[in-house]
Amino acid sequence: MRIQNRMNQLLRSIYGVLPIEDINNAEELIIYQEYGIALELICVQLYEYDKTIDVYTKNLIMELILDMGLNTGLIDGIKVYLE
């Protein structure tokens, strides 16, 4: 699956978790193919707002980080709730 599709899938997963402003900012970055910056924004905001996500979303984030060659430390501190 293309990175853009998976990034949009990530946005759908975190809709309602992060403020709409952060979702809109990430979406705009994705439109301009700034996938790494969008992913960094999402990870930082999840951490800063102390948000909890599901395992599926965290795995998707990790796959995107690895596929883009980003620092895996981006996912540190992001909490997961158990389903």
Image (cartoon, helix red, strand yellow):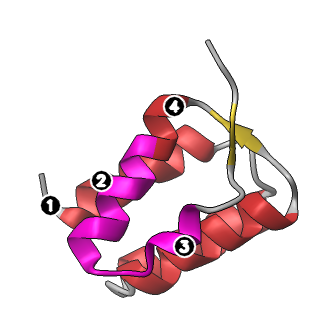
For label 4, the residue is 55
Task: Please say if the residues under marks 1 and 2 sit with CB atoms less than 8 Å apart.
Answer: yes
Whichever of labels 2 and 4 marks the residue nearer the N terminus, that label is: 2
Q: Secondary structure at mark 4?
A: helix
Magenta: main secondary structure equals helix
Amino acid at pointer 2: Arg
Task: Please say if the residues under marks 2 and 4 sit with CB atoms less than 8 Å apart.
Answer: no
Whichever of labels 3 and 1 marks the residue nearer the N terminus, that label is: 1
Q: Residues within 10 Å of mark 2 (few under 14, many from 20)?
A: some
**Which of these two is toward me, 27 or 57?**
57
Q: Residue at x 49, y 85 (%)?
A: 37
Q: CA distance from mark 4 to mark 1?
A: 21 Å
Label of residue 6 in the image: 2
Magenta region includes residue 71: yes
Whichever of labels 4 and 3 marks the residue nearer the N terminus, that label is: 4
**Which of these two is toward me, 60 or 13?**
60
Task: Indicate which label's residue lies in the foreground, 3 or 1.
Answer: 3
Question: Is any atom of residue 79 visible in this view?
Answer: yes
Question: Is any atom of residue 24 visible in this view?
Answer: no
Residue bounds of the magenta highlight: 59-75
Q: Residues within 10 Å of mark 4 (few under 14, many from 20)?
A: some
Give residue 15's position: percent from left, percent from top: 64, 44
Task: Indicate which label's residue lies in the foreground, 2 or 4.
Answer: 4
Q: Residues within 10 Å of mark 3 (few under 14, many from 20)?
A: few
Label of residue 50 in the image: none
Magenta region includes residue 82: no
Q: CA distance from mark 2 to mark 3?
A: 20 Å
- Classify residue 18 as left or right of residue 24: right
